[in-house]
Amino acid sequence: MLDVVFVHGLGGDGDGTWRPKGSESWLCWLAEDIPSIAVWSLTYPAGSTKWTADGEGMALPERASNLIPTLNYYGIGSRKTLFVCHSLGGLVVKQILRQSAEMAMPDWAPIAESTVGVAFLATPHSGSDLATFTKIVAVARPTKTTLALTSHCPHLKELGDWYRQNAARLGIETASYAESRKVRRVFRTVMVVTVTSADPGIDGCITTSLDADHIDISKPTSRATDTYRGIETFIRRQLVRSISAGGEMAAAGGALTVPTPGGLDAGTAPTGDLIRKIRELQAMGDMNLLNPGEVSALKLGIVNHYYGVGNE
C-alpha cells in the first residue's frame, strides 16, 4: 500500500484545486486505476490576501509544524508515502520533510523516512514574481503565506538547498512539471511560475513543461492529459520501488505481501453507517477503535467524499 497525499497551493483547497469545472476529481481516477494506493487530499488555510483569509496566515515553518500532527493523526508515515503538490503546496511539503527529518520529535520522523517520491506541479522553488507584485501593491494586503512566495526570498533558497542536499539521502525521487501558458490577472496576463523557478535543481529530474497555465496544470480534464499520465506513471514507479525494497527484506527472511484495501474495490464509497461511525470516532479523537478494514474504507472514502486530511 502506498499513501498518495495531494497538497494544494495558494488560494486552493483539497477539492477544487484538483477538480476541473463540470468534472469529477482526477483523484478518483487514480484510485480506480491503481488499486494498491490510498489517496488523500490535504486541506489547510492558504488565503492569498487578508480580504480572503482569516488572520495573517502562517509562514512556512509554522504551517509545517501545524500540519505534521494532522498527518500523524491519519497515519501518514506508517506506510510508504508520495506527495503530489501544486504551487505553494510543494514548498509546504519540502518544509514538512525538513522539520520531520531534523526535529528531535520521534512522532514526526516517520513522515520523512517513509516518503519515496514528491511530484511538483508549478511549484515556485525560487519564488514568484506575482508574489512580489502582490507585496508591492499595498491594497492586496498579502498574508504571511503569500509573502513566503516572494522572488529571491532567502528562506526559499535555504529550503531549496536543503531539499537538493537531502532528497537522495532520504531516498526521495522527484518529478517536476511547469506551466507554459500565462494566466489572466485583472487587466494583464502573467506567467505565475517560470520554468526556471519550477525547477527544483535535483540531479536526474528534468522539469517538463505542460500545455497549461498555473491554474489548469492541477486540473487534468481526462486520463489522456500529460498531467495525469505523468503523475500516474510516477506513482506506479514508486510502487515498484517500494515493492522491490520490500522484496529485498523478504529475501532476508520475511514474506512480502501487497495488501488489498479491506475487500473493497478502489473508488468504492463506504456505506452511510460506516461514514457516521468514522466521523464519530474522529470526533472522539480515537481512530484506534477502527479495525483495518474500516480504516481502508475511510481511505477509499476520502477519494469520493473528501474526508481527507484536515478536511473535518
Image (cartoon, rainbow, N blue to C red):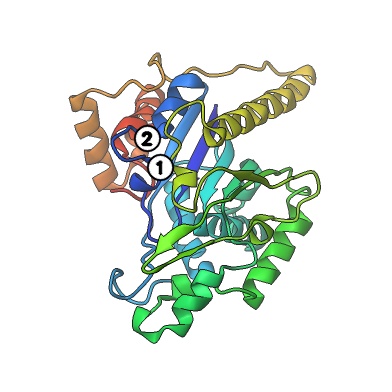
In the visual, does 99 lie left or right of 275?
A: right
The answer to whether residue 227 is above or below residue 206 is above
Q: Nearest the camera: 157 or 196?
A: 196
Quarter of the image holding residue 19?
A: top left
Label 1, residues with CA under 10 Å away: few <14, some 14-19, many ≥20: many
The answer to whether residue 307 is above or below residue 108 is above
Identity, as a three-letter code, of the amino acid under mark 2: Ser
Identity, as a three-letter code, of the amino acid under mark 1: Trp
The alpha-carbon separation of the residues under discs 2 and 1 comes to 6 Å
Q: Earlier in the sequence, mark 2 or mark 1?
A: 1
Seen at 34% across and 83% down, the residue is 139
Seen at 55% across and 52% down, the residue is 107
Indicate the quadrant containing the N terminus: top left, top right, bottom left or bottom right.
top right
Label 2, residues with CA under 10 Å away: few <14, some 14-19, many ≥20: many
Q: Where is residue 208 in the image (x, y as percent from the top left)?
A: 66, 44
Seen at 53% across and 52% down, the residue is 181
Q: Nearest the camera: 265 or 229?
A: 229
Q: Mark 1 points at which residue?
A: 18
Q: Are marks 2 and 1 in contact (CB under 8 Å)?
A: yes
The answer to whether residue 236 is above or below residue 12 is above
Residue 25 circle label: 2
